[in-house]
Amino acid sequence: MVVLSPFVYWAQTEKVISLRIDLKNVNEPDVKVLEDKVKFSAEGIGAHGRTQYEFNLDLFSSVKSSILDGEQPATVRVLDNRVDLVIQKEKPAWWPRLTAQPQKPAWLKINFDLWKSEDMQDSDEEKRDVMRDYPGMYDKLQKEEMGYRREEMIKVYLIIYNLFQLVGYTYILAVIGVRYAKLGYDSVNDTYEHVGSAMKFVQLMQYLEVMHPMFGYTRGSVWTPFFQISGRAFVLFVNIEAEPRMQTKPVVFYLFVIWSLVEIVRYPFYITQLYKIEIGVLTWLRYSIWIILYPLGFLCESVVILRNIPYFEETQRFTVPLPNEWNFAFHMPSFLRFYLLHLAMAGVFLMKHMYKLRTNKLKPKIVIRKCK
């Protein structure tokens, strides 16, 4: 279940932190101010309509969490269009940011109406114009806000991309399954005719995953997805699309099923990671399903390439014989034999890589408890 957070606008003075929570028609908010954390939960009308909203903030430094010397550590004011929360700092000091971690949540904004800096003097008589008096600081804060908005846009884009790919591979698997349920094994030979175009489209879309780390949208290597996606593209476009006789072979049916099963697990896993949601079954499948499907996929790809060698010997497709004006020769069947050797080595490397990821992700967590 996705937890909805309201927009929160914050400001500070040397002694207090002010939070303006953008919720309307709130009755009894549940507010807890701990030593270095603020927890809020309430039902109200926000950006997603009337529903339950909540947020947790790990604060940069300590605040007062209990009543000391008759001073109220936190003041909550429930108004018609917002909830105001004023929190007393443990020690008077100017914080460089509100949260303990440098990454600010997308729903946390700066309240420029109340904003003060260390250079400003607290004054109730005169309201300072931040834009006029401190243009450098204003531009800096606005730039920071734009940076967070960019991160949010990247997140939305990645969710849409992964969801689109999930729908594409689910469609391919559904068409294959429905046809097999109706026609039985007779549907196998026509697999490429019915889902070949969809498979080519989603396969080409996967090259965006090569560009994502290049643009900084995701972390990780560029070359690993490039070689993996290009290997599939070589089998699909060069060995199946270019040779009509290969398109009717049963191995294409099994290959498309294997590729689709891998992806309908991988893309939902990526979506949950973007939302920072951990689903145990999905995580286990992501790092375990390859143990069966990857070797079968390598086997099917090898069969496609091996069966194509006599076809390319016959048609001389993609072969460049001598003599020619470039003084260059290329023999496609010989290249396919070399590629089969390369595919075997790449398969071993990829299996080792996935095993290492699985070990790191699924290793049991060791909890050390102190004995009293």
Image (cartoon, rainbow, N blue to C red):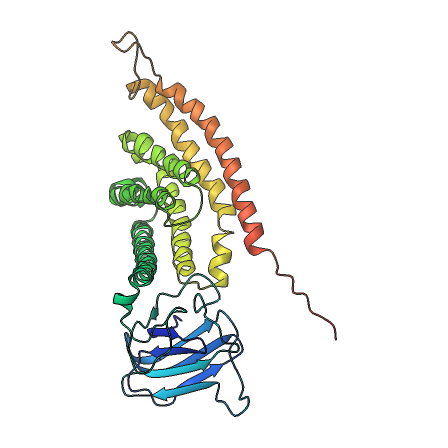
Task: Work out whether residue 71 or residue 129 is closer to the camera in this orientation and state it.
Answer: 129
Q: Is residue 60 above or below residue 352?
A: below
Quarter of the view holding residue 313? top left
Instruction: Please state the horizontal and vertical placement of residue 187, each as a whole percent of the image.
Output: 30, 45
Q: Is residue 28 left or right of residue 36?
A: left
Task: Kindly identify the residue that appears in the image at 29 percent across and 30 percent down.
Answer: 245
Task: Kindly identify the residue that appears in the image at 37 percent across and 74 percent down.
Answer: 10
Task: Work out whether residue 26 or residue 119 is closer to the camera in this orientation and state it.
Answer: 119
Residue at the right extreme?
372
Instruction: Please state the horizontal and vertical placement of residue 334, each as a whole percent of the image.
Output: 40, 19
Task: Kindly identify the residue that appears in the image at 35 percent across and 65 percent down.
Answer: 106
Q: Is residue 360 left or right of residue 190?
A: right
Instruction: Please state the horizontal and vertical placement of residue 210, each as a whole percent of the image.
Output: 36, 42
Quarter of the view holding residue 1? bottom left
Q: Is residue 154 left or right of residue 273?
A: left
Residue at the bottom extreme?
70
Q: Is residue 268 above or below residue 56?
A: above
Residue at the top extreme?
323
Q: Is residue 139 above or below residue 252?
A: below
Task: Work out whether residue 271 or residue 44 is closer to the camera in this orientation and state it.
Answer: 44
Does the rendering let one see residue 320?
Answer: yes
Task: Work out whether residue 202 or residue 157 is closer to the camera in this orientation and state it.
Answer: 157
Does the rendering let one see residue 43?
Answer: no
Q: Is residue 159 above or below residue 237?
A: below
Instruction: Please state the horizontal and vertical placement of residue 112, each as a whole percent of the image.
Output: 30, 71
